[in-house]
């Protein structure tokens, strides 16, 4: 027997069962909306029907439950169950009429960072819900619709033709009209930095989102200078305008423990994090030493470091063993700003996957575009300048607006645009304003 025939036989059997247990009733019913209906579905009885109840156990996927109202005691959660922000969630409903209940459920799920693109429903009353949900970007699959149900019940002479006709008339006259708007691709609500900070597990990511929100800054300045005095002077000047200072510690001529201490004091005073752009790219055992030991002892002072995914997951395992105990975090380099770089396509995709598998340590990406829907991941984009398109050595620049609005960066990283300016504090303020206004534009559009 063909697969499709088997399926339709099972649907037929299920519909007859639902009729027999009175989950589908015919008569004169007042619906929640106040409308009089000749057909009524009461699928609460299927708690004794294991088909739906066992879906998640049968497929071994975690199940979440949405409360109608947040309980007013305990955790006050609308969504019960364990999940990672950014995970996809399939909505399973019993009956769909106008689609508004599925839409509300999708909105609750999205407000906690879950991604909703599909819903399945046992019975579609065929009153416009499918179209409404399509407009909202949710594809609805139903096991059976009213018209098929009526055909099955008529075939088995469970109801007279007059009742079937009455129901068909009712559906025809009570279909929710599709909206006048042309279908648009669903745009998910953009969460604020504060909301994303609340969703993060890692303390460094939480702290960074908190600083970005309270200082109104999504600007990181790259202090690519070669003396400690120059770096400390710059950090003090731009400190009020930045959420993060990025260093290249191996270009400093006079590195010392005192420098680290002074930089840490400035970071505390001005409230910014320190990111050492070390780009670890060796086997786990070697990067462990590079991170912990040597002249720089990076793990002792840098809140954040970054790594190439090129060596495979071992690079993260090695760094993690040093950094996790110190509550440090890592960014993976998924894309680069330089002309002709090879971090593209499958390499970038594999990097995102690696980050997803190491969320206890990896808090985001150095990238040129948004690569993950997971709101806990921070995307940082270098190669940003207000004027200038390149540096003659492969660097390629985009504007703060392009980086944040078009490419969906969370943080812009600016080096020469700030520290080469005769007045770095004013330059930093300009970049801060441009990038934060771009973020606010994204939030409201
Ligand atoms: P610039 O002066 O704004 O061009 O400095 C950019 C900084 O970001 C510099 O420290 C680079 O090492 C760093 N960077 C980058 O420019 N592009 C990349 O793809 C990565 C890092 Br990864």
Image: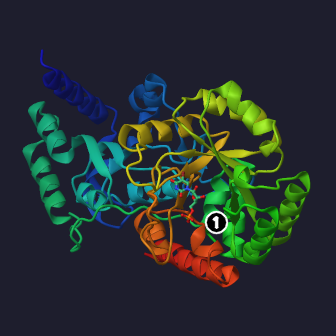
Q: Quadrant of ligand 1?
A: bottom right
User: Coloring scheme of the render?
Assistant: rainbow
Where 237 falls versus 6 (above or below)? Answer: below
Where is residue 290 shown, x and y percent of the image?
A: 73, 36
Assess disc 1: are there few (<14), some (14-19) or many (≥20) residues with their C-alpha within 10 Å of its C-alpha. Answer: many
Residue at screen point 44% across, 59% down = 104
Q: Nearer the viewer, residue 328 or 266?
A: 266
| Image quarter hosting the C terminus | bottom left
The spot of residue 196 in percent (x, y) is 61, 59
Q: Quadrant of residue 161?
A: top left
Tally of numbered tags: 1
Whole-percent x, y for residue 260 in the image: 85, 55
Which one is nearer the viewer's eye here, 258 or 81? 258
Residue at disc 1, secondary structure: strand
Answer above or below: position of 41 versus 129: above
Which sits in the foreground, 339 or 382? 339
Question: Among all residues in the image, which is located at the extreme front?
Answer: 253
Residue 147 located left or right of residue 84: left
Q: Residue at point 39% right, 62% down?
A: 32
Which residue is painted at 52% across and 60% down in the image? 381
Q: Can see residue 51?
A: yes
Residue 263: x and y in percent read 83, 62
Q: Which one is in front, 189 or 403?
A: 403
Outermost residue on the top side: it is 1
Looking at the rendering, in which quadrant would you find the N terminus? top left
Residue designated by label 1: 220
Image height of 340 relative to 208, above or below: above
């Amino acid at each position: 027997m063909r697969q499709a025939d088997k399926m339709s036989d099972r649907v037929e059997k299920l519909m007859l069962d639902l009729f027999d247990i009175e989950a589908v009733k015919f008569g004169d019913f007042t619906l929640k909306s106040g409308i009089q209906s000749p057909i009524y579905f009461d699928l609460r009885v299927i708690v004794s029907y294991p088909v739906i109840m066992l879906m998640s156990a049968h497929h071994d996927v975690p199940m979440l439950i949405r409360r109608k109202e947040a309980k007013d005691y305990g955790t006050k959660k609308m969504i019960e169950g364990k999940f990672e922000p950014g995970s996809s969630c399939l909505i399973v409903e019993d009956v769909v009429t106008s689609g508004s209940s599925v839409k509300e459920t999708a909105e609750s799920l999205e407000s906690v960072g879950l991604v909703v693109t599909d819903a399945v429903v046992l019975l579609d009353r065929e009153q416009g819900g499918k179209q409404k949900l399509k407009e909202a970007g949710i594809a609805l699959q139903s096991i059976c619709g009213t018209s098929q149900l009526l055909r099955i019940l008529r075939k088995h002479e469970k109801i007279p033709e007059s009742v079937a006709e009455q129901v068909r008339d009712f559906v025809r006259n009570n279909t929710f009209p599709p909206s006048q708007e042309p279908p648009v691709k669903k745009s998910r609500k953009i969460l604020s930095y504060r909301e994303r900070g609340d969703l993060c597990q890692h303390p460094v990511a939480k702290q960074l989102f908190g600083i970005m929100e309270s200082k109104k800054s999504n600007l990181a300045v790259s202090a690519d200078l070669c003396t400690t005095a120059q770096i400390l002077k710059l950090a003090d000047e731009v400190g009020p305008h930045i959420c993060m200072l990025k260093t290249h510690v191996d270009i400093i001529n006079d590195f010392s423990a005192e420098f680290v201490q002074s930089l840490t004091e400035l970071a505390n005073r001005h409230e910014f994090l320190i990111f050492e752009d070390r780009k670890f790219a060796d086997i786990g055992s070697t990067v462990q030493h590079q991170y912990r030991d040597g002249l720089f002892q990076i793990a002792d002072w840098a809140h954040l470091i970054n790594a190439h995914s090129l060596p495979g997951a071992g690079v993260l395992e090695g760094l993690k063993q040093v950094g996790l105990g110190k509550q440090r975090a890592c960014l993976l380099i998924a894309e680069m700003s330089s002309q002709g770089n090879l971090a593209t396509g499958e390499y970038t995709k594999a990097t995102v996957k690696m980050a997803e598998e190491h969320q206890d340590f990896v808090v985001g990406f150095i990238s040129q575009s948004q690569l993950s829907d997971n709101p806990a991941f921070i995307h940082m984009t270098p190669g940003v300048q207000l004027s200038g398109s390149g540096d003659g050595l492969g660097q390629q620049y985009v504007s703060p607006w392009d980086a944040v609005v078009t490419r969906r960066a969370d943080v812009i990283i600016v080096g020469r645009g700030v520290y080469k300016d005769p007045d770095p504090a004013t330059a930093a303020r300009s970049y801060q304003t441009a990038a934060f206004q771009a973020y606010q534009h994204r939030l409201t559009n």
